[in-house]
Amino acid sequence: MNQGDSSAVTSLPVPGSPAGSVAATTSTPKEEVDHKLQQAQEQLLKLRRLQEDLERQKGDLEELRRKQDEYSRGRGRVIEDLTRGMVLLEREQVQAQRLAELCVKTRQCFSEYLDQIQSIRDKEWTSANLRPELTKALGVVENARIEYNRACTKLDCLQPAKAA
């Protein structure tokens, strides 16, 4: 071969000849270029597939990062909301317990005044004891009225306009 000659000699089986016979062929520069072109196209195809895989991985990672950010923001917001809600509910619970205690005490007081008023036996008063019994009964009724009015200012349920 000449130094400038870049053609190579390869041995290929000749079709239609006995299995052991081989004919010598030389590849031309065109075949060599075609072969290199084919290799380049195959390499480009592999690179495109690799690029698609990398882009898919990038998309998956971006989605994962977005979900992590969403989780972090959501978690922070919910923790803040739940904490604030617990404080508000605790205040409401304390207020409700105070109201319940006030209702129990007021109800007991009302019950005592009702018993006192119902125990007054005005039919049994005589002209001799009318004045002191009437004064005593008026005192009980006045105290009951004062207690009722005091309870009305503390308890909305006793005010028909507010209850409606």
Image: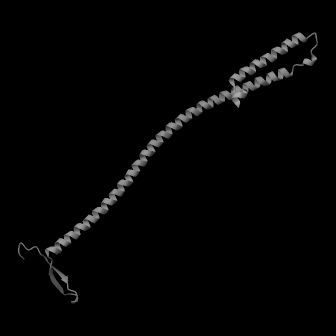
Where residue 162 appears, x then y in whole percent?
69, 28
Residue drawn at point x = 19 percent, y = 72 percent = 34
Q: Quadrant of residue 56?
A: bottom left
Q: Is residue 86 above or below residue 117?
A: below
Report whether 164 appears left or right of 34.
right
Q: Is residue 116 above or below residue 57?
A: above
Report whether 100 appears left or right of 5.
right
Residue drawn at point x = 17 percent, y = 75 percent = 31
Q: Is residue 128 above or below residue 155?
A: above
Residue drawn at point x = 69 percent, y = 27 percent = 156
Quadrant containing the C terminus is top right
Quadrant containing the N terminus is bottom left
Where residue 113 appears, x then y in whole percent?
80, 21
Is the image coloured rainbow, by chain, by secondary structure, or in one colour? Answer: one colour
Residue drawn at point x = 79 percent, y = 16 percent = 142
Where residue 33 appears, x then y in whole percent?
17, 71
Q: How many marks?
A: 0
Front-most of 149 and 80?
149
Where residue 60 appears, x then y in whole percent?
39, 54
Report whether 114 appears left or right of 36.
right
